[in-house]
Amino acid sequence: MRIGLLGPPGAGKGTQAVTLAEKLKLPHISTGDLLRKNVASDTVLGRQAKDYMQRGALVPDDLVTNMLFEKIAQAEAQEGFILDGYPRNPAQAEALDRVLKEKGASLDLVIYLDTSEKVIIQRLSGRLVCRKCAAIFHRQNMPPKINMCCDHCGGQLYHRSDDKEETVRERLKVYRRETASLIDYYQAKQKLYQVKADEDAGIVLDKMLMLIEKYYDSPKV
Ligand code: AP5
């Protein structure tokens, strides 16, 4: 199973990808998480990506694409994956199609988490992330049991620096300009499945699971 998640910042891609990956026993591959790890470890890639991320811009395609393709080539990703944060533009989508085609594979389905701007702002302004394991929380929607402390590993929670209001505005602009056209890209390939994602995370997850079950149960031409 190769499943892609598409949607604006704050749509819940990371939140849903973690649960889907657990349920479907597939690796969760998030280009945002991989880049943040590189920035935190001050790698060459991290130093190259940092400024773009802080501004809310996309990191250049070649940097992200090389990083992602290394991950996809690993043994644990051979049976499939849940992909979150990639592709972000048509060039990335085409590069992904090419690399999967070389393996005789393709993305099976792309789930578009359709989210309103009001909800996006509420979600991003309250998001908390674990420094150690990258688990995602929210001050009101999904609060940790102990203030600013991760329920899973005890790590310290922090606000992502790109969740500042002006950077969120920029990320939304970038999403509309660069990424939103992928809805049409995957629709044209009959791979796009839309889920209204303003609702509670459990409801959104159930809708996604139903969709996935239906897709894999239906006969393929
Ligand atoms: P990335 O980390 O991918 O950020 P994003 O796409 O902007 O998405 P977010 O992580 O902000 O949101 P999400 O949809 O995952 O929401 P979440 O589940 O956390 O990328 C960051 C940066 O890295 C980019 O700006 C770019 O610079 C660079 N980058 C990454 N990939 C790249 C690529 N391919 N090419 C170039 N550059 C790239 O949820 C948000 C909050 O809402 C959380 O607090 C959560 O608890 C809460 N929540 C989630 N779902 C619900 C729900 N249903 N109900 C209530 N609360 C909810």
Image (cartoon, rainbow, N blue to C red):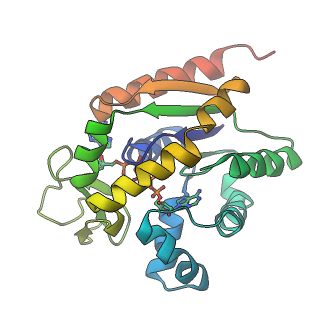
Tell me: 20 left or right of 102: left
The answer to whether residue 121 is seen in the rendering is yes
Q: Is residue 221 above or below residue 34?
A: above
Task: Name the spot of residue 103 as percent of width and height, x first.
Answer: 85, 48
Picture quarter with the N terminus:
top right
The C terminus: image quadrant: top right
Residue 176, percent from left and from top: 50, 43
Residue 116 image position (x, y, % from top left):
33, 33
> Which image quadrant is residue 197 in?
top left
- The answer to whether any part of residue 152 appears in the image is no
Residue 141 falls in which quadrant of the image? Answer: top left
Q: Is residue 18 left or right of residue 117?
A: right
Which one is nearer the viewer's eye here, 217 or 197?
197
> At x 76% / y 39%, what residue is drawn?
106
Q: Is residue 46 above or below residue 17?
A: below
Q: Which residue is at a point 23% across and 59% down the rendered structure image?
A: 151
Up the image or down, 169 lies above or below 183; here it is below
Residue at the image position 16 percent from the left and 53 percent from the top? 139
Q: Position of residue 172 (x, y in %)?
A: 42, 49
Query: In the rendered picture of this protein, how many numbered marks are placed on residues?
Result: 0
